[in-house]
Amino acid sequence: MKRLLVIIYLLLAATSLHAADSLKTVSLAYDVDFKMNFDNRELYKSAFSRSMTIFGARVTPSIGLAVRPQAGEEHKVMVGADVMKDFGGVQTRILEELTLYYRMQKDLGDTDLTLYAGIFPRSRTKGDYSPAFFSDSLLFYDNNLEGVMLQIRRPKASFELACDWMGQYGPDRREKFMVFSAGEGKILPFMSLGYAGYLYHFANSYTQKGVVDNILLNPYLKFDFSDAIGLQCLDVRLGWLQSLQNDRVHGNGYVFPSGGEVDLDIRNWNVGVRNRLFCGTDMMPLYNDKDNTGVKYGPELYMGDPFYRVYDDGNDGMGIYDRLEVYYEPDFWSSSKYINIRIAAIFHFNAMKYCGTQQMVTVRFNLQSLLCR
C-alpha cells in the first residue's frame, strides 16, 4: 500500500512539474500601433486629385496569448481595437474596426516563416509596392487586411503572399478580394531582382451587375550604391508596370496599359531627395466607366495614386508623371525601427507641367518592433 501511495505521489509530482513547465511556454502578449498623418494637398492645377487636408491619428492596441512550444517557434492569438480620429471631425470612431488574428513565427535555420490569419494591420506587409498599387490616403484609411498572409525571409531574399477579402456580396456591396504578392532577392552585393503584383477581383452586388478583373505586375531591378558612395542611401530602382484589365459585361475585352518607372532615392544626414518618374499609358483606363446602375468605378476599382492616370481626357498615347519628394527623416533614437518621423514636401508633374504639391508629416510608433529587438 505504501509503495502504491509513493508511486501515485511520484506520478502526481511529475505531472505537476510537466504542467508547470508547459505553462512557462504560455505568456501574455500585447502590441500597440500608432500613426499620426498630416497631409496638406494643394493640387489646384491637377485634374486627378482634389485639394484638401488630411489630418488625423489612429491607435491600434491589441492583447492576447503567446505560446512558445519550442525554441524558434511562437504562436499568437491577438484581439484589439482600431481607434481613429480625423482632426476637426465630429466624433472619434472608437471601433473603426476590430482586429482579430493568429500569427505564427517559425525559425527554420536560414529561413524565417511568418503566417498571419484574420484581421491584422496592413503595416505587417514588407513588400516594395509602387504608389501605382496603393495610394498614400489608402494606406492611412484602410489600415487593416482581412484574410491571410504568408511571409518567408532568407539572408538574401524575402517573399510575401496575401489575400485581402475586401467586400462581402450583398444588396449594395460588391464581392471584392485582392491577392497580392512581392518578393526580392540579391543577385549581387549591390543589385537585387524583385517584383510586386496583384490580382483584384471586382465582382457583383445584388444590384450592380458585372465583373471587372484588374491585374497589375511590376518586375524591377534595384541597385544599392550606398556603401560604395558612403551615403545613408543611394538606391536606383528600374521597373516595368504591366496591367491586364477586363470589364466582362460592359467592356470590349482586355486592355493592357503599361509603362516604365525609374525611382531614385538619395539620402544623407537624414535629408533625402526621392524622384519617381513614370512614362507610359493611362494605368486606370476604366476609371470613368460606369456599371449598370450608373455608378462610376473610380477609386473602388483603382487603389493606386490617381496621377498614374496620366491623361484625364481618355487619350491613349504615352504620358509622363513625375513625383519629386524632398524629405527629412531624423534618427534621434538608436533604435529607430519602432519610432519613425518623416517630414516631406512632394511635387507632382504631369506631361512636364506642375500639378501641385503635398506637405506631409507622419509619426509612427510600433511596440512590436521594439519587443522583437
Image (spheres, rainbow, N blue to C red):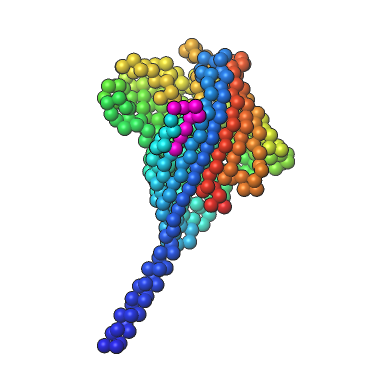
Q: Position of residue 15 (x, y in %)?
A: 35, 73
Q: Position of residue 48 (x, y in %)?
A: 51, 17
Name the one closer to the observer, 341 or 325.
341
The residue positioned 59% from the left and 29% from the top of the image is 360
Quarter assignment of residue 166: top left
Left or right for 96, reference 360: left
Name the one closer to the observer, 28 or 274.
28
The residue positioned 56% from the left and 29% from the top of the image is 38
In the rendered image, which quarter contains the N terminus?
Answer: bottom left
Name the one closer to the observer, 364 or 162.
364
Magenta range is 83-90
Left or right for 16, reference 319: left
Name the one closer to the observer, 347 or 177.
347
Quarter assignment of residue 329: top right
Q: Position of residue 251 (x, y in %)?
A: 36, 17
Q: Is residue 316 above or below residue 54?
A: above
Q: Position of residue 276 (x, y in %)?
A: 60, 27
